[in-house]
Amino acid sequence: MELQEEIDQLKDAVTSHAVVDQAIGLVVALGRVTPDEGWTVLREVSQHTNVKLRDIAEMVLLWARTGELPSSVRTALEEALDRCGPAPARTMEYRPLR
């Protein structure tokens, strides 16, 4: 039984890591920041909104598909990008792919 629990935890960790990596990629592409800055942005958004990092990453991925992002997360994301990124022409306007 303990082995199955460990296997389940490892599966969850791998899935969570993939979700976070994908969200970092979106932040890098849309925010014009480095991967390290993308990680910092997601971490700061998580801390400032008091939402788990994986949940923030899932919201960012959903935003990429739907264009919808909770306003508190959008504000925290824009503020974190302003602190981290060098691109003054950056905009967080995103139109989902259809």
Image (cartoon, rainbow, N blue to C red):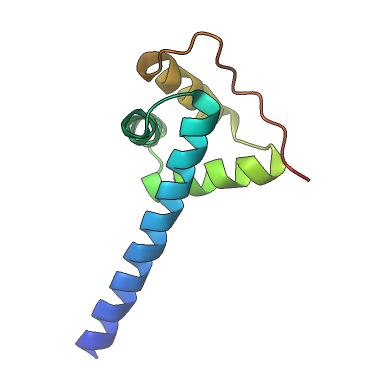
* Side of 62 where 49 appears, left or right: left
Whole-percent x and y of residue 58? 51, 49
Residue drawn at the location 40% of the way across and 18% of the way down = 85
Kindly indicate the quadrant of the structure image that contains residue 43.
top left
* Side of 2 where 26 appears, left or right: right
Q: Is residue 17 above or below residue 67?
A: below
Q: Is residue 73 above or below residue 88?
A: below
Q: Is residue 52 visible?
A: no
Which of the pair 28/45 is nearer the observer?
28
Residue drawn at the location 59% of the way across and 34% of the way down = 70
Residue drawn at the location 33% of the way across and 77% of the way down = 8
* Side of 44 where 77 appears, left or right: right
Outermost residue toward the left? 2
Q: Is residue 76 visible?
A: yes
Q: Is residue 37 above or below residue 18?
A: above
Outermost residue toward the top? 88
